[in-house]
Image (tube, rainbow, N blue to C red):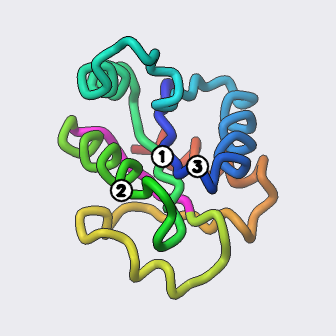
Amino acid sequence: MDLFISYSKADRPFAERLRKDIEALGNNVFTDAEISSGEAWDHALRKALEATHAFILVVPEPGARNSNNAFFEAGAARALGKRVVAVLPVSDESRIGELRSDLFGQQVFDGSKAHPQSLANSIVTALNAA
């Protein structure tokens, strides 16, 4: 399965680990970091999202630099009819209330309570079931 993962710069280590674990399960994972600097970002993003089956949002910490980009990408994925799941990289149940209203109803995973490989397996299983 081809997946797109979006994250803020502060969550890069978490997202890279998640990416590797998801790829180890036989999936392809893309990010906006793979868009070359010469490409028109909006066109390249749409092309990448259209080529994927689902979208994983690593929910940024409040006030994280460029966090709106991650939410924008999630909204674009939803607009293209992609399944979106959210992952909280730290355990703080109060953060569930921070999710934008257009993400309510989506499956949310707590990335701090599960072993990384188990988290990746749970996400892939949920997306395959959709």
Mark nearest the camera among 3 and 1 is 3
Residue 58 drawn above or below residue 100: above
x%, y% of residue 98? 40, 77
Residue closest to the eye, 57 or 66: 66
Q: Is residue 96 visible?
A: yes
Q: Magenta span has 24?
A: no
User: Residue drawn at (30%, 39%), measured in percent from left and top?
Assistant: 82
Residue type at mark 1: give it. Answer: Ile
- The dot on residue 9 is 3
- The dot on residue 68 is 2
Magenta stretch: dominant SS? strand
x%, y% of residue 52? 40, 26
Q: Quadrant of residue 100?
A: bottom left
x%, y% of residue 89? 64, 63
Q: Which residue is mark 1?
A: 56
Instruction: Compare marks 3 and 2 and give the one earlier in the sequence.
Output: 3
Dot 1 crowding, Cα within 10 Å, few <14, some 14–19, many 20+: many
Instruction: Compare marks 3 and 1 and give the one earlier in the sequence.
Output: 3
Q: Which residues are magenta?
A: 81-87
Residue closest to the eye, 37 or 110: 37
Find numbered disc 1 in the image and state the secondary structure of the residue it sits on.
strand
Q: Quadrant of residue 73?
A: top left
Residue type at mark 3: give it. Answer: Lys
Residue type at mark 2: give it. Answer: Asn
